[in-house]
Image: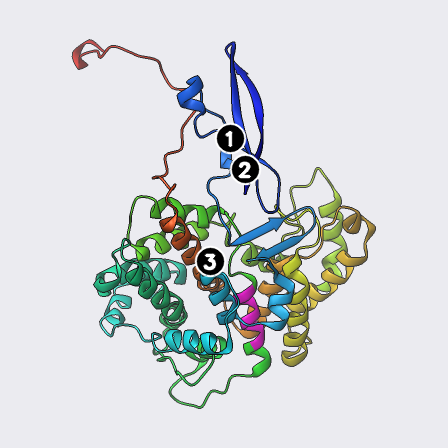
Amino acid sequence: MTEKRTAQLNVNGKDLELAVKSPTLGPDVVDISKLYAQADVFTFDPGFTSTASCESAITFIDGDKGELLHRGYAIGELASKSHYLEVCYLLLYGELPTAQQLEDFTNRVTNHTMLHEQMMQFYRGFRRDAHPMAIVCGVVGAMSAFYHDSTDVNDPWQREVASIRMIAKLPTITAWAYKYSVGQPFVYPSNDLDYASNFLRMCFAVPAEEYVVDPILSRAMDRIFTLHADHEQNASTSTVRLAGSSGANPFACIAAGVACLWGPAHGGANEAALNMLREIGSVDRIPEYIAKAKDKDDPFRLMGFGHRVYKNFDPRAKVMKESADEVLALLGVENNPTLQVAKELEKIALEDPYFVERKLYPNVDFYSGIILDAMGFPTSMFTPIFALSRTVGWIAQWKEMIADEKQKIGRPRQLYTGAAHRDYVDVENR
């Protein structure tokens, strides 16, 4: 990053010079950090959509080009050639690991997959019909009550231990939330399986019979994890950073991210896409809904098409589509009306000039919802799986924030529109 020039600003007749910083990639940034001190004014930016809240070297998005980079590596290449734990290492430490480093990292994660046995009783405190996301949020936050030796954010080793613990234990936490929601016994992790296969086994195995993970499903699950690992300064990541800026323990910070992700405008997009497919119901009703989508006066919107950030094709969608095709070929769609609708709607959206011209391509949420549904996950599990996938991104961003010497506790300002100063009136005189 360099400061190459200044921006001129006149406020109430006072001329100011603001530094302009140039990133490695992306638009220049006007530094307004001293604006209040120099001119006694704030900026107004609802949603912070034009504000860089931090410096980061982890993830870069160019929405116009449809580009997503992790530490400089394109997401499509990582998802095709790499796997989730290698991407975890990349996000956490900044470089792709050597074979020895990857083996050591994988062993460290694998050896921390068990949960403290007393946490099993914690699960039983939830109602049997509790949403899995509520359970995941609560259990992640409760980790600070079970792992006291990794809550000191000022100790680099404790931060490292907490990071490994969360990456290792989130599959167990999430799988057990699912098992509890369906009334089945918990399945302990099996350290002879890879990360994705272990998660699938903990979700779908039962003590009464043998369960063997299909490698196609395992690979698809790994890709879902990889493609959701990090996505720059989104709402949940910003929440983790904001919570971390106060010095909160790492488990509390990640639980805050889980809670933010739960919002339907953030982590619930794949669930919304699948609910839309179910609403359509059958292939012969697709033309009706296509017409509704094209009618600007109709409130109906096609979920899972286009993206707020990506103004072109979602770079994650291409790889996810390959996995969706493989999974549907394995499991079949003939007897599943929802998946039949998905395949036909995808075909229309990729060919219809209305969608092509507006770049309303199927996005990662469209395909991930199809895959998870085909695997047998209920929609209530979609966002918990998203949280599991995103945990490493939250941790990487949190660790970067903690190590940033310029980081301050988050304190957004406001444009106050309430009452001006008023005198108190005693109750008997009101």
Closer to us: 348 or 75: 75
Residue 298 locus on image (x, y percent): 69, 41
Q: Which residue is mark 1?
A: 45
Q: Which residues are magenta?
A: 219-226
Residue at disc 2, secondary structure? loop
Please give the name of the residue rendered at 36% of the width and 80% of the height, measured from the top-left corner: 187
Write down the residue under mark 3.
393
Q: Does 221 appear in magenta? A: yes
Q: Are marks 2 and 1 in contact (CB under 8 Å)?
A: yes
> Badge 1: few (under 14), some or many (20 or more) residues near its Cα, within 10 Å?
few
Task: Label the magenta part by its dominant secondary structure.
Answer: helix
Inspect this view and state whether residue 304 appears: no
- Residue 316 figure quarter: bottom right
Q: Secondary structure at mark 1?
A: loop
Tell me: residue 264, above or below residue 45: below
**Colour option used:** rainbow
Q: Position of residue 429 (x, y in %)?
A: 19, 9
Q: Residue at x 31, y 59 (%)?
A: 156
Q: Indicate whether 346 appears above or below 334.
A: above
Location of mark 2 (residue) = 49
At a point 60% along the width and 80% down the height, the residue shown is 216
Q: Is residue 267 visible?
A: yes
80 left or right of 349? left
Q: Residue at x 36, y 50 (%)?
A: 402
